[in-house]
Image (tube, rainbow, N blue to C red):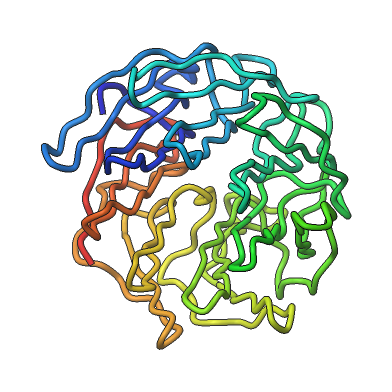
Amino acid sequence: MTVDRAIHQATLLLDGTVLVTGGMRAGEVGLDSAELFDPATGEFRPVGAMTSVRKAGHSAVRLPDGRVLVAGGWAGSTVTSSAELYDPRTETFTATGSMAVARSDPAAALLPDGTVLVAGGYDGDRTLDTAEIYDPKTGQFRAAGRMSTPRTSIASAPLPDGRVLLAGGAGGDTVLATAEIYDPVSGRFTPTSEMGAVRYKAAASPLPGGSVLVLGGSDQRDWSGQYRTAEVYDPGTGTFTATGSMNAGRFKIGTAVASLATGIVVVAGSDPSVESYDPGTGTFRPAAGDVTAEYQFATATALADGRVLIAGGYDPDIRPTSGSWLFRA
């Protein structure tokens, strides 16, 4: 990349390029910069700066018209409620309506009607149970009810019927095993069954048939409590079932998991190795090669040609990298 980054976001655009936004660089300096990766050339180039520094914890969701909603996160030493839109036609960011509250590390998901759910997170003082919906037609956020429990660093994924799974996370000083479902029809959050383990800073990825893979994360021990384990949520039964374990313990991987059109899930981050999950066998397999270091808060983005772009992250000494890698299944 053009700068070293960790805790950034990477969003696949309609033309197949990847937008990389914000994060922090060496010295924990927050970034307002953004760049584009072109799979055809294998190169990154800068685009216009964001309207705010977003050092960590912001969300980035592509809208149906190709624009990207970027919201919240740490704007330096405080959490922001501001949001902005990236327009790929002009390669510029423009401010849009702000959230009702400041949020870092919420769950964010595109809903079937083209609006965006932003739920939970941390406001700088407390973990949140509130949620909001952004409407691109009005450029405004509106209230969207409350979760059953406050959560941040949530593992979330869309379900085939338009609902959204929100699993685990941290609620204050407690790491959670509980999960809930947001239903855009009723506008309500409803508890579902608990996971087999408490998990935060984990990842969730849709699987063929509508189930969701929830993997990795940590317990209250944070760095020393990283999991190799994974489980699958079945929306038909509303239950989690253990599946095969990863070859390495991984956490801080919420943005480092990518689902391929084949159903394979590629997992990077928190270890030099990269591995893939096969839903047909329920097992993980190590990939050939590695990403040279144990990078936390990296991103993994499935490209249109079936490859996966892995970019950035920081090592155990909190040194971000500008490196990127391409995974081929």
Left or right: residue 239 versus residue 212 is right
Report which quarter residue 168 is drawn in.
bottom right
Whether 182 is drawn above or below 107: the answer is below
- Residue at left 71%, top 30%? 103
Between 282 and 91, the one nearer to me in the picture? 91
Residue 287, image x, y percentages: 25, 67
Whether 15 is drawn above or below 327: the answer is above
Instruction: Quarter of the image for the C terminus: give it.
Output: bottom left
- Residue at left 63%, top 48%? 113
Which residue ends up furthest to the front in the rendered image? 137
Which residue ends up furthest to the bottom in the rendered image? 281
Residue 178, image x, y percentages: 79, 64
- Residue at left 77%, top 47%? 151
Residue 276, image x, y percentages: 35, 69
Report which quarter residue 54 is drawn in.
top right
Whether 174 is drawn above or below 233: the answer is above
Left or right: residue 294 versus residue 196 is left
Instruction: Quarter of the image for the N terminus: give it.
Output: top left
Whether 292 is drawn above or below 197: the answer is above
Residue 194, image x, y percentages: 78, 71
Numbered-mark total:
0
